[in-house]
Image (tube, rainbow, N blue to C red):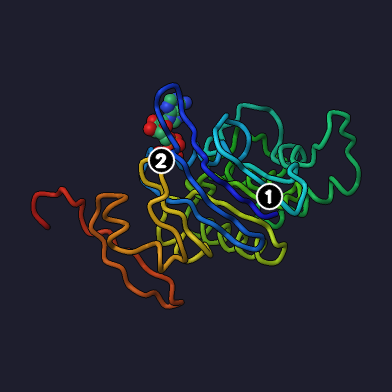
Amino acid sequence: MRLSVRGFSLRYGVRVAVDRVDLQANPGEVLAILGANGSGKSSLLRGLAGVQRHAGTVEWSGGEPGRVGYMPQDTSARSQLTAFEVVLLGRLRSLAFKVDVADLKAARDTLEEVGISHLAERPIRELSGGQRQLVFLAQVLSAGPSALLLDEPTSALDITHQLRVLALLRSATHSRRLTTIVVLHDLNAAARFADRIVMMHDGRVAGHGTPAEALTAETLRRCYGVEVAVFSGPDGAPVILPLRPCDADAAP
Ligand SMILES: Nc1ncnc2c1ncn2[C@@H]1O[C@H](COP(=O)(O)OP(=O)(O)OP(=O)(O)O)[C@@H](O)[C@H]1O
């Protein structure tokens, strides 16, 4: 599904969190949303997912709107459900849900794909933060979405799981022609795994383009207030080395 967003604004009372954002996301493409804390990334994603009221137009074309999978930032869970049951819930399409063999298989396959089959029978409330994050990612994927809206899906993961999950998202996006929008804080991960980047600053789009176009020292200084060095990595993607906050008194 192609996503076209025009004049998107979102406010909490008088506080403007997202201010007249335009963006496009295409099937087969990972779009990373980056920006400093409070720049409006989660608010934008919540609006796109339809869980927060907003102004402006959000158009999904070329697919069923019901096929948009949303994973919020907060994956805390107090339920007694097992990881398998949580993933199976991703298959729920109506209140008259009947579990059939295809649903069970899809849930099992997704647990395997995400590398957490060994957690299947564990109650979700007893899992670690990173394990829970993987379970909720599997829940979203098990639904067979055409589009993914993922809010910091790797924030609690160790480096191995970060690499695995981002590689999985990238390959699934390309091979299944998903439209994937992912909020990330890790600039280097975004540089390697995203096809395009939108940089948010104070609720607005402050830069966009390929990783090399969007992740310039100038844009990062403006958006994060930090001096960085930008190198070219082994696979050609930019590598960002944060040096010091712009307001630091003296360089170390
Ligand atoms: N429920 C809320 N009520 C009032 N203001 C809110 C609410 N949620 C977010 N905000 C404000 O909206 C702005 C954008 O917040 P948002 O959570 O979208 O930022 P973010 O870029 O996702 O930040 P982070 O990187 O810290 O997750 C911030 O100024 C924040 O304080």
In percent of width and height, residue 141 lies at: 70, 50
- Residue 156 shows in the view: no
Q: Position of residue 97 (x, y in %)?
A: 87, 33
Q: Earlier in the sequence, mark 1 or mark 2?
A: 1
Residue type for callout 1: His
> Please, what secondary structure does the residue beneath circle 1 have?
helix
Residue tagged 1? 118
The C terminus lies in quadrant: bottom left
The N terminus, quarter of image = bottom right
The image position of residue 193, as x and y in percent, is 52, 64
Q: Amino acid at mark 2?
A: Gly
Neighbourhood count class around disc 2 (C-alpha, 10 Å): few under 14, some 14–19, many 20 upward: many
What residue is rendered at 23% in x and 58% in y? 227
- Inter-mark Cα distance, 1 to 2: 41 Å
Number of other residues with Cα within 10 Å of mark 1, as a class: few under 14, some 14 to 19, many 20 or more: few
Q: Is residue 121 left or right of residue 245?
A: right
Which residue sits at x=49%, y=39%?
42
- Relative placement, left or right, of 93 versus 19 is right
Q: Is mark 2 within 8 Å of ligand 1?
A: yes
Q: Which quadrant of the picture is home to ligand 1? A: top left
Return the mark for residue 39.
Answer: none
| Total numbered badges shown on the rendered structure | 2
Residue 146 appears at what percent x and percent y? 72, 52
The nearer-to-camera label among 1 and 2 is 2
Give left or right: position of 200 versus 241.
Answer: right
Label 2, on which residue? Answer: 203
User: Is ligand 1 closer than 8 angstroms to the Cβ of mark 1?
Assistant: no
User: Considering the numbered disc 2 on the image, is that residue within a helix, a strand or a loop?
Assistant: loop
